[in-house]
Amino acid sequence: MTFTAKAFITVSTLMFAAPACAEDLVFDLINNSSVTLHELYVSAHDTDNWEDDILGTDTLASGETVSVTIADGKDTCDYDLRFVAEDGSELERNVDLCKMSSFTLTN
């Protein structure tokens, strides 16, 4: 299965209390999709550029979870997430990181 628009991953966000803005934002990324993620970018929504790949040389296989910490010191909750799968296809979502403790990818 590919990570394409046809079989695009549905994104489910579980909403829970989270830290106030301007503090580190922490959430669990749960990969319940059928693809392995090779790259993850998180950037404040009001910026035009993506930050560095959070996964680096690591990957996030189907069924795995990783804790993500955003410690950019910004006073915002509105972030864009960009996921890149093993086949190079991409998915982008805008989320309010102050309102969530986990983010689940499913298909």
Image (cartoon, helix red, strand yellow):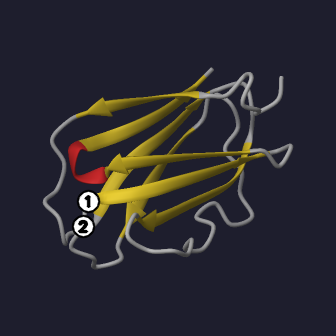
What residue is disc 2 on? 76
Q: Residue furthest bottom?
A: 73
Q: Residue at x 42, y 38 (%)?
A: 103
Residue 64 in the image: x percent, y percent? 60, 35
Q: Is residue 29 left or right of residue 60?
A: left
Q: In this rendering, is residue 17 above or below 19? A: above
Q: In this rendering, is residue 27 above or below 105? A: below
Element at badge 2? loop
Badge 1 amino acid: Cys
Badge 2 amino acid: Thr
Q: Residue at x 72, y 30 (%)?
A: 5
Q: Are marks 2 and 1 in contact (CB under 8 Å)?
A: yes
Residue 7 in the image: x percent, y percent? 72, 22
**Would you identify the image quadrant in which residue 24 lies?**
bottom left
Q: Residue at x 57, y 71 (%)?
A: 50
Of residues 79 and 63, the one nearer the viewer is 79
Q: Residue at x 28, y 42 (%)?
A: 100
